[in-house]
Image (cartoon, rainbow, N blue to C red):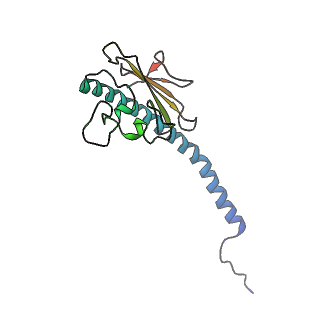
Amino acid sequence: MKKSSNGFSLIELLIVVAIILIIAAIAIPNLLRSRIAANQASAVGSLRTLNTAEITYSSTFNLGFSPTLVALGPNGTLNPVASAAGLIDEVLAGGSSGVAPTLNTSAKSGYTFVYSPGAADPAGRIDIYTFTANPVTDSTGTNHYFTSESGVIRQNSTGAASTTDSPLAG
């Protein structure tokens, strides 16, 4: 009587499962690093967008920089006004970011953005501002970013970034 040899043996299946686990163990950390790099690139891009929006706000409304982050966001109509200029999207303006709603905080791509306008001068103009971008957790990013009205984006890998940190290259 011949023994039927249809299918795979238990040993063969275990070897295949072990190979799949080894490949996954190699691939998953690379995937996480890629995600962190993408989040960090998004944060830098968002800070560039925010700097451009502030310059556009200042030149369009002739009031200095915006009093709040929300003022840079959309107002639902096609007519921009100083309190809702429509220069950045709703997420970056803090409208649907998942962060506790405030006028100067938003979150996007694993980073929390905080806007700090300077004090208004006697004419009501705001002449300085800062933005910080900090990772929500270590798994969403490792670098902290800072920018101001100078437009220079600065980075710190150990803690919150400030004016004394090194600027990004390029």
Q: Is residue 16 left or right of residue 59?
A: right
Question: Could you tell me which residue is drawn at 48 percent across and 15 percent down?
Answer: 164
Q: Residue furthest bottom?
A: 1
Q: Residue furthest top?
A: 122
Residue 40 in the image, given as x and y percentages of width and height: 47, 34
- Choose top left, top right, bottom left or bottom right for residue 84: top left
Question: Could you tell me which residue is drawn at 33 percent across and 31 percent down?
Answer: 83
Q: Residue furthest right?
A: 1
Question: Could you tell me which residue is drawn at 65 percent across and 59 percent down?
Answer: 17
Looking at the figure, which quarter contains the N terminus? bottom right
Vertically, is 3 above or below 161? below
Between 22 and 63, the one lying in front of the other is 63
Question: Could you tell me which residue is drawn at 32 percent across and 30 percent down?
Answer: 53
Between 35 and 91, the one lying in front of the other is 91
- Choose top left, top right, bottom left or bottom right for residue 76: top left
Vertically, is 106 above or below 132? below
Q: Is residue 5 visible?
A: yes
Looking at the figure, which quarter contains the C terminus? top left
- Choose top left, top right, bottom left or bottom right for residue 10: bottom right
Residue 13 in the image, given as x and y percentages of width and height: 67, 65
Residue 91 in the image, given as x and y percentages of width and height: 41, 40
Vertically, is 8 above or below 85? below
Q: How many marks?
A: 0
Residue 115 in the image, given as x and y percentages of width and height: 43, 26
Q: Is residue 153 visible?
A: no
